């Protein structure tokens, strides 16, 4: 049984859009101007109508025979359609094979890259372990040298005698000479100290007795008292009193802290995506602003600056480079926008919406709000 789905090359699970695409492709090939025939074009059209009505599973031959007695011609046309369908299926299978092959190559490349990354990581770890072992060996060599240098001459001589008795004469000759040289040097130092001590005692005894007495008395003398150079004021001139009083009052005036300047506080609105004019609560300066759906604001003041009031309830994200931090105000974090997206009049006047810090700001009524701001700023200044 040949159904309308078989003629059109569709299935019951295909969407209406895919059925339309299939019909357009077959109608282009079945058109009389492109090598087809009028009867074949009518059959494709009838199959499309039945499939769109939900009758694609019905038998197509019987239906067509009832309407037109040219069954043999329609069968030939159906065979042609089946050939076209087979060709299309072959093309589809080939494309699917190419897609599977490309996916397999991509998977192989990913596995190779991950294996290479793992090998690089293991090589880096081995290099670090090698460096650590080299450091440990260097530290052990330094400790061994320090322990050898800390040994006494007697222990060195004992070690030397034990090594000479246990080892042949030709083994470790250079090390033996170093130890003998160290022992001879220490003996020379001891001999120099023993000979220099009597000479020092004789030199002290040859000094005059008066010099010894002066030296001893100087040890018991108390240090001289330091004289204070600060003058004592007995009487104060009245002019000096007035001058000091004025300086004290001036210092008291300077010590009073200045009152902090009032910061501009933004007024909140419920409507988003529309520019509106407002006034700061503290300074009463005009501005225009627009609110996003997430509760953030973009504001322009009379100085021509654009500011981004980010709602702190939003999740943290990596901010763009054109947002310069200024301060915190209630539940907003305020950023200046000196450049970048949303920092010029041309961007706002020529667009339907702008994306700032992953937030969409629908742009409505900018021209009227900006003109109103200019008039208000010129009147205020």
Image (cartoon, grey):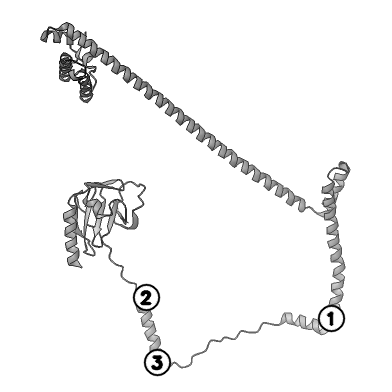
| 344 and 115: which is toward the camera | 344
The correct choice, above or below, for 260 with respect to 22 in the image is: below
| 159 and 44: which is toward the camera | 44
Mark 3 burial class by Cα count in 10 Å: few <14, some 14-19, many 20+: few
Q: Which residue in the structure is indicated by mark 3? A: 239
Res 48 label: none
Question: Which quadrant of the rendered structure holds the N terminus?
Answer: top left
Instruction: Return the x and y of residue 374 as percentages of the image width and height.
Output: 19, 61
Q: Residue at x 47, y 30 (%)?
A: 111
Instruction: Return the x and y of residue 31 as percentages of the image width and height.
Output: 19, 19
Q: Is residue 175 left or right of residue 268?
A: right
Q: Residue at x 25, y 51 (%)?
A: 347
- Decide if residue 96 is in sight here: yes
The correct choice, above or below, for 213 with respect to 175 in the image is: below
Mark 2–mark 1 Cα distance, whole angstroms, equals 69 Å
**Secondary structure beneath disc 2?**
loop
First reached walking from the N terminus: tag 2 or tag 3: 3
First reached walking from the N terminus: tag 1 or tag 3: 1
Mark 1–mark 3 Cα distance, whole angstroms, equals 67 Å
**Secondary structure beneath disc 1?**
loop
Instruction: Return the x and y of residue 280 as percentages of the image width and height.
Output: 22, 61
Q: Residue at x 36, y 77 (%)?
A: 254
**Secondary structure beneath disc 3?**
helix
- Decide if residue 59 is in sight here: no
First reached walking from the N terminus: tag 2 or tag 1: 1
Instruction: Return the x and y of residue 339 as percentages of the image width and height.
Output: 32, 55
Mark 2–mark 3 Cα distance, whole angstroms, equals 25 Å
Res 255 label: 2
Q: Which residue in the structure is indicated by mark 1? A: 207
* Quarter location, residue 261: bottom left
Q: Residue at x 31, y 52 (%)?
A: 340
* Quarter location, residue 124: top right
């Amino acid at each position: 049984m040949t159904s309308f789905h078989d003629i059109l090359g569709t299935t019951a699970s295909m969407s209406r859009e895919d059925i339309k695409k299939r019909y357009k492709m077959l109608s282009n090939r079945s058109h009389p101007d492109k090598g087809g025939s009028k009867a074949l074009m009518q059959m494709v059209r009838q199959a499309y109508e039945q499939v769109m009505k939900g009758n694609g599973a019905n038998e197509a031959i019987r239906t067509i025979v009832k309407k037109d007695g040219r069954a043999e011609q329609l069968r030939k046309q159906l065979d042609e359609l089946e050939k076209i369908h087979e060709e299309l299926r072959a093309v589809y299978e080939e494309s699917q094979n190419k897609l599977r092959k490309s996916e397999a190559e991509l998977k192989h490349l990913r596995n190779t890259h991950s294996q290479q990354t793992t090998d690089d990581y293991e090589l880096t770890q081995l290099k670090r372990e090698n460096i650590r072992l080299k450091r440990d060996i260097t530290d052990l060599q330094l400790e061994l040298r320090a322990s050898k240098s800390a040994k006494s001459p007697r222990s060195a001589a004992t070690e030397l005698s034990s090594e000479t008795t246990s080892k042949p004469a030709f083994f470790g000759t250079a090390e033996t000479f170093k130890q003998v040289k160290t022992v001879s040097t220490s003996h020379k130092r001891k001999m120099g100290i023993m000979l220099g001590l009597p000479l020092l005692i004789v030199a002290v005894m040859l000094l005059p007795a008066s010099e010894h007495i002066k030296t001893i008395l100087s040890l018991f003398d108390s240090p001289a008292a330091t004289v204070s150079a600060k003058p004592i004021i007995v009487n104060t001139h009245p002019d000096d009193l007035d001058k000091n009083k004025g300086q004290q009052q001036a210092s008291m005036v300077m010590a009073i802290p200045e009152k902090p300047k009032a910061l501009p506080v933004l007024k909140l609105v419920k409507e988003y995506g529309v520019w509106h004019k407002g006034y700061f609560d503290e300074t009463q300066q005009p501005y225009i602003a627009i609110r996003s759906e997430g509760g953030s604001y973009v504001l322009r003041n009379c100085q021509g600056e654009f500011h981004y009031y980010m709602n702190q309830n939003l999740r943290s994200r990596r901010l763009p480079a054109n947002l310069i931090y200024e301060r915190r105000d209630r539940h907003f974090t305020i950023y200046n926008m000196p450049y970048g997206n949303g920092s010029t009049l041309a961007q706002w006047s020529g667009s339907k919406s702008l994306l700032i810090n992953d937030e969409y700001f629908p742009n409505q009524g900018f021209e009227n709000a900006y003109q109103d701001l200019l008039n208000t700023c010129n009147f205020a200044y």
